[in-house]
């Protein structure tokens, strides 16, 4: 626990000044770097015996889709998604391996990985919106405070398992603690830099983003069990891989962006 807290404190002390004072460029660079790390972690999990070739295709497809999400219009995004599927199928057709039984599975893993990891682009899109820094802090605060609240309340009070088949340690008490701390974080962000949000908005977003984070966490746990690995990587000591740390953000960021566009826009 001490290692987890220490690494989190060091990470925040480096991240927060960069996000606050670095502007849009700092967010673009950090999110791009995070995507690259996550691609490497996912490729290692999904393709343990052929991570260089298939991971290279995954990286190329993810980069193209990521750039399209950030810099193209809606028709361009549709084309990029289609090309993502086509490129994966073409690669597996030309390089099927010794047997054909696993080619569809590998193509699916490439498409899933590219689309899933590209959801980090919503952090960049949030930063581009009016009051973008506030929206960015809202999604990070609710996601990470939800994780923290879930961890400590689960350890202290957890008894009823949430979904033991996928995540044996996660409990309903932990979810309740995570939602509570996430909602408190949303209220703090409102008073610091998002005054246009009402208290009711914060209560709704605190619950919605925290629950989205729980689902994101469970989804990553499901993938790790499918890939038969314990952690996605080792880049974050005490936490595992970067994917282990941001799995909740991957689901919460698109949800918040939808709120900003549909409700606040």
Image (cartoon, rainbow, N blue to C red):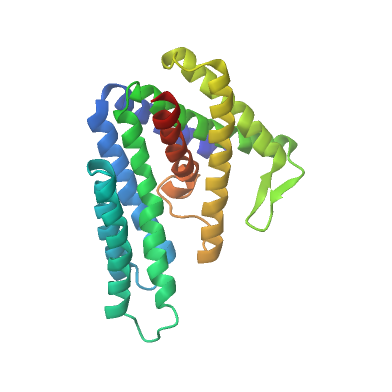
Is residue 71 or residue 31 the one in the foreground?
71
> What's the residue at 56%, 16% (across, down)?
199
How many marks the image carries: the answer is 0
Residue positioned most to the right: 159
**Residue 92 occupies quadrant:** bottom left
Q: Quadrant of the C terminus?
A: top left
- The picture places residue 170, in percent across and down from the top left corner, at 66, 46
Residue positioned most to the bottom: 98
Is residue 152 or residue 186 the one in the foreground?
186
> What's the residue at 69%, 44% (across, down)?
171
Q: Is residue 200 above or below residue 39?
A: above
Residue 57 visible in rendering? yes
- The picture places residue 9, in percent across and down from the top left corner, at 45, 30
Q: In which quarter of the image is the N terminus?
A: top right
Residue 12 visible in rendering? no
> What's the residue at 40%, 26% (across, down)?
135
Is residue 197 or residue 139 the one in the foreground?
197
- The picture places residue 253, in percent across and down from the top left corner, at 43, 37
- The picture places residue 3, in percent across and down from the top left corner, at 51, 39
As drawn, is 136 to the left or to the right of 170? left
């Amino acid at each position: 626990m001490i290692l987890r807290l220490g690494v989190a404190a060091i990470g925040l002390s480096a991240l927060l000044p960069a996000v606050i004072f670095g502007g849009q460029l700092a967010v673009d660079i950090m999110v791009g770097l995070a995507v690259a790390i996550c691609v490497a972690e996912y490729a290692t999990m999904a393709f343990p015996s052929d991570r260089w070739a298939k991971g290279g295709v995954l990286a190329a497809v993810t980069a193209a889709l990521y750039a399209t999400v950030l810099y193209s219009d809606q028709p361009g995004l549709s084309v990029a998604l289609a090309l993502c599927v086509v490129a994966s199928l073409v690669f597996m057709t030309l390089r099927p391996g010794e047997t054909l039984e696993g080619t569809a599975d590998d193509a699916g893993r490439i498409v899933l990985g590219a689309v899933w990891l590209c959801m980090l682009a919503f952090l960049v899109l949030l930063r581009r919106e009016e009051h973008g820094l506030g929206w960015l802090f809202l999604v990070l605060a609710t996601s990470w405070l939800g994780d923290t609240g879930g961890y400590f309340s689960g350890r202290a009070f957890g008894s009823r398992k949430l979904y033991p088949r996928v995540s044996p340690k996660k409990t309903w008490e932990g979810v309740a603690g995570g939602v509570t701390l996430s909602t408190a974080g949303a209220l703090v962000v409102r008073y610091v830099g998002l005054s246009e949000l009402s208290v009711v908005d914060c209560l709704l977003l605190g619950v919605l983003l925290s629950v989205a984070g729980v689902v994101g966490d469970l989804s990553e746990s499901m993938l790790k069990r499918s890939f038969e690995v314990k952690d996605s990587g080792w880049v974050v000591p005490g936490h595992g891989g970067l994917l282990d740390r941001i799995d909740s953000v991957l689901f919460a960021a698109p949800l918040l962006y939808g709120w900003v566009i549909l409700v606040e826009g």
